[in-house]
Amino acid sequence: MPLEAYLAVSAALFTLGIVCIVSRRNILYVLMGIEMILNASSINFAAFNRFNGDGLAGRMFVVFVIILAAAEAAVALAIVLNVFHLFKSIKPSEVDLLRE
């Protein structure tokens, strides 16, 4: 596959991630959008690594992004569970304790 195919898939994932974040109807959608953006960056790192010399730098960045995404998912899901416990909703617009 050419580099442009990888970049097109990455751009599509990035765009879907941004749409998920901007629509923000649900906190879980926002988390999925962040995961899609991180996966898009991983695809870019892997693709440029493959077509630019096949060294270890791109692979190390991909592993770092995967570890970062796993840590982000664990912390974010803990926050979502706490928000659901406090507000009985996971919609970002209904979480307004600091507005009062």
Image (spheres, rainbow, N blue to C red):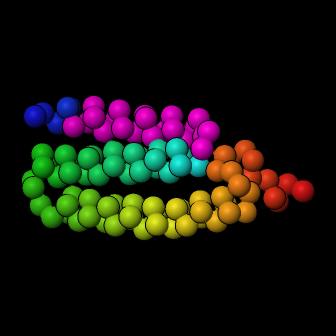
- Whether residue 47 appears in this view of the structure is yes
| As drawn, 82 above or below 6 | below
Provide the residue span drawn in magenta.
6-26
89 displayed left or right of 49: right
Q: Residue at x 52, y 62 (%)?
A: 77
- x, y (%) of residue 7? 26, 36
The number of discs equals 0
- x, y (%) of residue 76? 53, 62
94 displayed left or right of 48: right
Q: Quadrant of the N terminus?
A: top left
11 displayed left or right of 3: right
| As drawn, 65 above or below 34 | below
| Residue 25 is covered by the magenta coloring | yes
Q: Quadrant of the C terminus?
A: bottom right
- The quadrant holding residue 9 is top left
Main SS of the magenta part reads helix
- x, y (%) of residue 32? 46, 47
Q: Residue at x 33, y 45 (%)?
A: 40
Q: Residue at x 58, y 37 (%)?
A: 22
